[in-house]
Amino acid sequence: LASWETHTTSHADWNLAVQYFEGYFNGWKRMCLNSNPSSGCQADGKWCKDLLTGESGICLPGWKHSGDLSQEIGTGAAPDGDEDAIVAMILAIKAFEGKEKPNWYDELRKWTDASCTSV
């Protein structure tokens, strides 16, 4: 998405990139929501909320999840992966500047901020 700064949103590849990113973002949310809050650094576990389901959870997931993202199978921190995901979310937010925003854009902004500032 970040490479599209000078492109228009009418380009077919832009729509595909947005679709793929939405999938990655949904995967990040699922991993966070499936993670055990007592195993991470966010003991209250109520920082991030899925606007579609209303489910709340931590904003930085455990380090390992099943292939279908249905369960956490390794607890603890993975700061390198967290940093990669957060940078991707920031780049996506920047990529949408001056373009039509998808219906999940505000949720992306909230999760990005909460992930960046989680303690």
Image: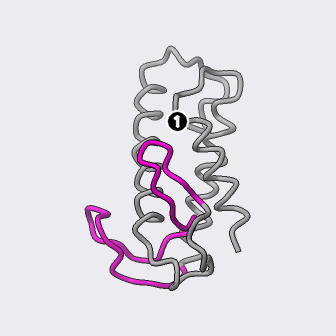
Does residue 87 belong to the magenta stretch?
no
Residue 61's spot in the image, x, y percent?
Answer: 50, 70
Left or right: 91 as drawn, with respect to 11: right
Left or right: 53 as drawn, with respect to 82: left
* Nearer the observer, 5 or 79: 79
Residue at 69% x, 68% y is 118
Residue at 36% x, 75% y is 72
- From the image, tell me which residue sits under label 1: 104
Main secondary structure type of the part rendered in magenta: loop
**Which secondary structure, mark 1?**
loop
Which residues, given as a range, are shown in magenta? 48-77
Tag 1: Cα neighbours inside 10 Å, few (<14), some, or many (≥20)?
few
Residue 22's spot in the image, x, y percent?
Answer: 45, 41
Quadrant of the drawing holding the C terminus: bottom right
Residue 84's spot in the image, x, y percent?
Answer: 58, 62
Q: As displayed, is residue 117 above or below residue 38?
A: above
In the figure, residue 49 lies in which quadrant? Answer: bottom right
Quadrant of the drawing holding the N terminus: top right
In the figure, residue 98 lies in which quadrant? Answer: top right
Q: As displayed, is residue 27 above or below residue 22?
A: below
* Nearer the observer, 69 or 96: 69
Residue at 60% x, 41% y is 92
Residue 27's spot in the image, x, y percent?
Answer: 40, 55
* Nearer the observer, 60 or 97: 60
Kind of residue indicated by mark 1: Trp
Residue at 47% x, 76% y is 62
Which residue extends farthest top? 10
Which colour scheme appears in the figure?
one colour
In the figure, residue 58 lies in which quadrant? Answer: bottom right
Q: As displayed, is residue 66 above or below residue 73?
A: above
